[in-house]
Amino acid sequence: MKLWAMVSILALITPISPPQVPGHSLTFADMSYLPGYVAYDIPISLFVPKYLQSACAALKKGEMKSAEKSFAAEIRKNPQHLGAVIGFLQSKRDQWDKLLPQYEKEAKLNPTAANEFKLGALAYYILEENLYRYEGVVLKRDPKNPHHFYGFGGGIPSKELVAQRSQITNIANYGLERTWKLTHDPIVVILISPYPIIDHYGKMLEEVIQRVGGARVYQTFIHAERNDWNAPQPAIKNGSLLDLTLLHFVVRLFLSNASFQRQYNTFRKINGKQELVEVTAPLTDRQKHAKAYLGLWLKRISKRVNEMKSKTHRR
């Protein structure tokens, strides 16, 4: 399993509660499908014009018909609007299986970035929603917390489930990979962050830094990475709230990756007996340096984001 995928999966085994979504504990599928969000704490509203803000709010409230109408109208007017596509797909969750063959046909006849994205994003949503099932894991709801699920089992899934997972993964991978090549739109990177199915996901994250941070910020980042993270911090330039949010998102993922600690089983003598215990490997020196560097960068970006939000609220 790829490191980026492994880190994401380990992070999602235990549901989390992002502060931006109060009271909502997330399951694996929720991480990719949380109405109104591209991925957990990145709202669709950042990627759409002001006249679609009410549609984004409708998604969060569960008012799917109202949201669907607004996003469908936007897509008819601007088919290349990927944020509107995500909003529309979220509003049509009960129609995903019916939309899949339609989108496959459209992408085959007219493989534009918009058609590839519609198909890839839809397949990705279907993959995420069924990932536990494809892995042969059974979920049980915690009776004390209706948003919390426990996974158990994890036996060998049937050949049919393996084939379904492979097919839907290939559709998602191809469509989103094509979209990235045609547009390099950061929304693709955010969408697949819970389960990064594209091989060069780490490079995609670097491209987002270069795109929203600029050449100087990107070169400072690369210089630090190549020098064991003993280097000056990147400048925080005056960008838009969207650019700073994207930069914050990517740096946070790099920090998460730097914090990954391998776990393994080994035998140890306990009370005179050899017992099998789980051990967590300590962070390497390079990981410690990366955590310190990326953690400071993240705090600096967070401070600028909060300053921008504060100014917006005062207006």
Image: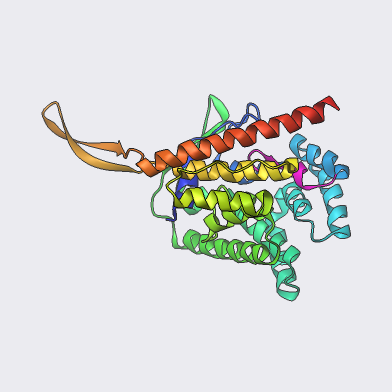
3 relative position to 67: left or right: left
Q: Residue furthest bottom?
A: 109
Q: Is residue 26 above or below residue 158?
A: above
- Image coordinates for residue 118, horizontal then vertical, percent: 71, 60
Residue 207 painted magenta: no
User: For the magenta stretch, what is the residue range?
Assistant: 37-49
160 relative position to 236: left or right: left
- Image coordinates for residue 175, horizontal then vertical, percent: 64, 65
Q: Is residue 295 above or below residue 211?
A: above
Question: Which image quadrant for residue 109?
Answer: bottom right
Viewer-proximal residue among 201 and 94: 201
Tell me if residue 273 can be seen. Answer: yes
Q: Residue at x 58, y 57 (%)?
A: 204
Q: Residue at x 38, y 50 (%)?
A: 155
The image quadrant where one finds the N terminus is bottom left
Q: Is residue 119 above or below residue 277?
A: below
Q: Residue at x 48, y 40 (%)?
A: 11
Question: Which image quadrant for residue 122?
Answer: bottom right
Question: Which image quadrant for residue 28?
Answer: top right
Viewer-proximal residue among 288 and 43: 288
Q: Is residue 61 above or below residue 103?
A: above
Viewer-proximal residue among 259 and 237: 237
**Number of callouts in the render?**
0
